[in-house]
Amino acid sequence: MRILQLNLNHCEAAQDLLCDTISKLRIDVAILCEQYKNLAPPNTWLADADGQAAIWVHGGIPVQERRARTGQLDSRPTFVCETLAPRVKSWTVSGRYTHSDHQAIFFEIEDTGTSTRPSMRQSRKWNARTLDAGRFSAAMSSASVAPGTAEDMASSLMSVITGSCDASMSKANPRRCREPVYWWTPEIADLLRSCLRARRLFQRSRGRHDEETHSANNASARRLLRVAIKTSKRRCWRQLCDEVNNDVWSKPYRIAMLRLGCPQAKQPSSPLLVRGAVAALFPRVPSGPALRLPRRAEELKPAVTLEELKGAQSRIKKRSAPGPDGVPNMVLKLAVATRPDIFLRVYTMCLETGVFPSGWKRQRLVLLPKPGKPPDDPSSYRPLCM
């Protein structure tokens, strides 16, 4: 978890630059003091009653709300509890320009793996935009699925597909660098570098004969940056108004729904609560021998045909979200087109033995809380399997 700590000095430009810093440096939590203003939803912004301190949470980190208490916050030191102190690393005072009288403090809290939060497995998704179709086809063409049980053949087929994905695509990074703020321009980037240089020259000139000159240059650079940010924000607002007149259902509609829409339902974060809800909603069936119907000697199950396989392939939607295996649908269609023979063998074996592979039954479970229901009741959640 990456933490930023900063005193904004009630400066609008400093808070604007903070938004860009958080977006570019992938900050998870910002501990702020003397903020310019409190941000409205959908931002997870927690502020004190006097508006002198705030915590800005990013990255979908769960927030536990408790009764408000009074206190003061000093932005210079960093306070952590005894159990958290050994996990704090990379503590540093950043030289990044903040447009405030204070410098930002960056540090990270290392995850020990013993947290009570549900563990998030490493993402298995691939970036479909980096697909090299030639490499994927070559990897699929040289692979084979050995004869065996339906479970073994299905597992081998998935290993072939995932191995071909590794050879032809890069993994999707869930913590990739985020986009800059909407008002960011190359001109503002140049002015930001000028401000940083002017500030350093001013700090080095203290007590010398050219201190007043560098002080004036620093003030001028800060003023130009502040004006450029305001001008860019006004320009973006005018462009948004023009888009409303031209096409109200595009970007303006998405922004309005993001601001006015209902807050997203939060899933339960307690492991005990999750296990209890899953056990109640999906009761375990006692294990025992599977019931098999007597098979007639003369009964023959026809093999899966190529026409049936192509029909199933044509119904796969390319832009649909992948399943738990992370294989993009467009890649799955390419795999079927490259090696239809191994798919036919696996599907025919499953049909003949009456086995649906357990790996293909695995789904991603989401528990959606029902409004107005007690959180400790398993029936208060609506299960959604994807």
Image (cartoon, helix red, strand yellow):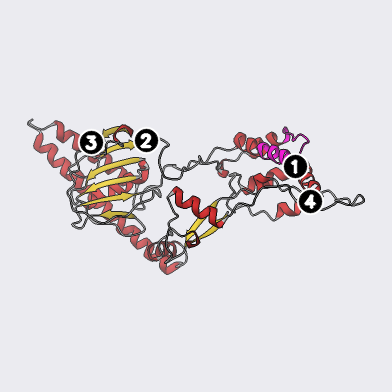
> Element at badge 1?
helix
Residue 71 position within the rendered picture, expressed as x and y whole percent measured from the top left: 17, 50
The residue lying toward the viewer, choosing from 241 and 169, is 169
Q: Is residue 381 left or right of residue 237?
A: right
> Element at badge 3?
helix
Task: Tell me, yes or no, whether the highlighted magenta stretch contains residue 157.
Answer: yes
Label 3 crowding class (10 Å Cα cut-off): few <14, some 14-19, many 20+? Answer: some
Labels 4 and 2 touching (C-beta < 8 A): no
Disc marking residue 150: 1
Position of 220 relative to 253 (above/below): above
Residue denoted by label 3: 197
Q: Which label sits in the foreground, 1 or 3?
A: 1
Gap between marks 4 and 1 measured at Cα: 16 Å
Sequence-wise, the earlier of marks 3 and 2 is: 2
Amino acid type of the residue that numbered disc 1 sits on in the rendered structure: Ala
Where are the magenta residues, as a range?
Answer: 141-160
Gap between marks 3 and 2 measured at Cα: 33 Å
